[in-house]
Image: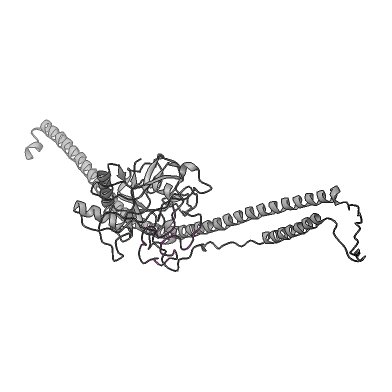
Amino acid sequence: MVALFDATHPIDRREDVEALRLALEAMRREAGFEIARLNRKLAEREYDAERVVATAAERQAMEQDLHTLQSTLNEKEQVLDRITSECRRLEDELEDRHVVFDDLREEVARKDLSLKEAREEVRRLQQNLAELQSSPSLALPPVVPTPVAAAPITRVPPHTSVSPVKPFSMGLISGLLVLGTVGLALWGATRVDLPLPWQSTRTATEPPPVPEAVETDAGSTPEPVITAPESPDAGIEQSTAPIRLSRDPLRGGGEGPTMIALYGGDLRMGHNSLSGADFGPQHDVRIPPFLIGAYEVTFDQYDRFARATGRPLPSDYGFGRGTQPVIGVTWADAVAYADWLGRQTGHQYRLPSEAEWEYVARAGKNGSYPWGFGMEHGRAVCFDCGTPWDNRSPAPVGSFDPNAFGLYDTAGNALEWVADCYTPGYDGAPTDGSAMLGGDCTRRVARGGAFNKPSTSIRTYVRAPFAPDTRLNMLGFRVAREP
């Protein structure tokens, strides 16, 4: 460095100074660049720190908002539950009013018919009276004295009246009697005595008698004999009436269940509910001909199958076996029994589809129950149906009157497995009467209500989903068969 400032070399010193100046300038620029880079890094770190703080604050605010939203959602769910309960209550009340309205309409129609008949009778009597008054036979015949030698002539006192024509007197008396009868009928027509919705024409103070039985295979309790209705209901077309009863012989001896053969027909399936339940929307279904069991499958029938196939006998839960409906069976157990019947008889037995089940439960009617719109005590077994079995046990099959198609116990007693997979509604459901086999097949459908379920559950359109391996003390089935 000293040599650079040597006085003997002035030119070399200037060049060294310029080189040093350039080097210092370059170092200064590099230092400036480094300082700027460090400033940017520091700024980025400060920004990140501020962003972390801001993100934590946002997270806390979002958690508070989420808590508020959850509380609001819980409140809305509670309100929705109350609204749903109120909708169901209103639906039940509406059904009861439908019953009263139907009874009033029928009573008014009956009284109107009686009034028309009475008016016609009055017009007929007036016409008869006019004809009698204008008849020439009413003129008094001339009196020809008959001479009688031995007997004096008896004269009638002036105050005594004698009817000259006896037939006219008798007709007048008959007319007065008819007019009196008509007056009584008209007086009675002003009275309307209607049963209350919960009243029934049948009381159930003691268990009804089990229908007459017929002999079956040895060692089993006889199955009740079914009597087909004499004629279809007034509002049902002939094509919906039962066409025959049959019991297929089994290869191992004895006979299978009593089956009712139906022509099939049109069904308005489901129910449109304000509460958004799973039995809507209503839709039209065309049911082809098929056969279905008149009764729920009994313990006797199922136990024979179980012994023949080496399956364990289901529990009767202390209710008894015999003609009690079999319970405590899974969906697969019911299908296996139907398959066994098919091998024994040579016919194709199966579980009914949900549409077929509702078709036979309604039996050509449009009401919520097999007998009409309103609940009638003593007509079935359920929690509050007014029978000795309520909430205690199922009744022996056939303990109550059959419906219009000749089927027993489609309301209450034991829930019945059907073939369908469960879906929470009928969107996309088949319209040809077949089973719904898509959707959530981890659950299957049961129909009909049970002895320990409320009366609202035995309505013809109510559905109940269960896992296929479910065994319950109120869950059984009935079978169907191809023609």
Residue farthest along the top direction in this orientation: 11
The quarter of the rendered structure image containing the N terminus is top left
Describe residue 448's horizontal placement relative to residue 298 as left or right.
right
* Residue 224 image point, x, y percent: 36, 56
The quarter of the rendered structure image containing the C terminus is top left
In-front residue for pair 52/293:
293
Range covered by the magenta-colored residues: 374-402
Residue 159 magenta-drawn? no
- Residue at the image point whose x is 78% and y is 49% from the top: 127
Describe residue 312's horizontal placement relative to residue 197 as left or right.
left
Describe residue 233's horizontal placement relative to residue 108 as left or right.
left
**Residue 219: quarter of image:** bottom left
Residue 392 magenta-drawn? yes
Q: Total of numbered circles in the picture? A: 0
In-front residue for pair 415/281:
415
* Residue 340 image point, x, y percent: 25, 47
* Residue 34 image point, x, y percent: 20, 43
**Residue 349: quarter of image:** top left
* Prevalent SS, magenta region: loop
Residue farthest along the front direction in this orientation: 150
Can residue 76 be seen from the camera position used here?
no
In-front residue for pair 214/438:
214
Above-or-below relation of 12 to 255: above
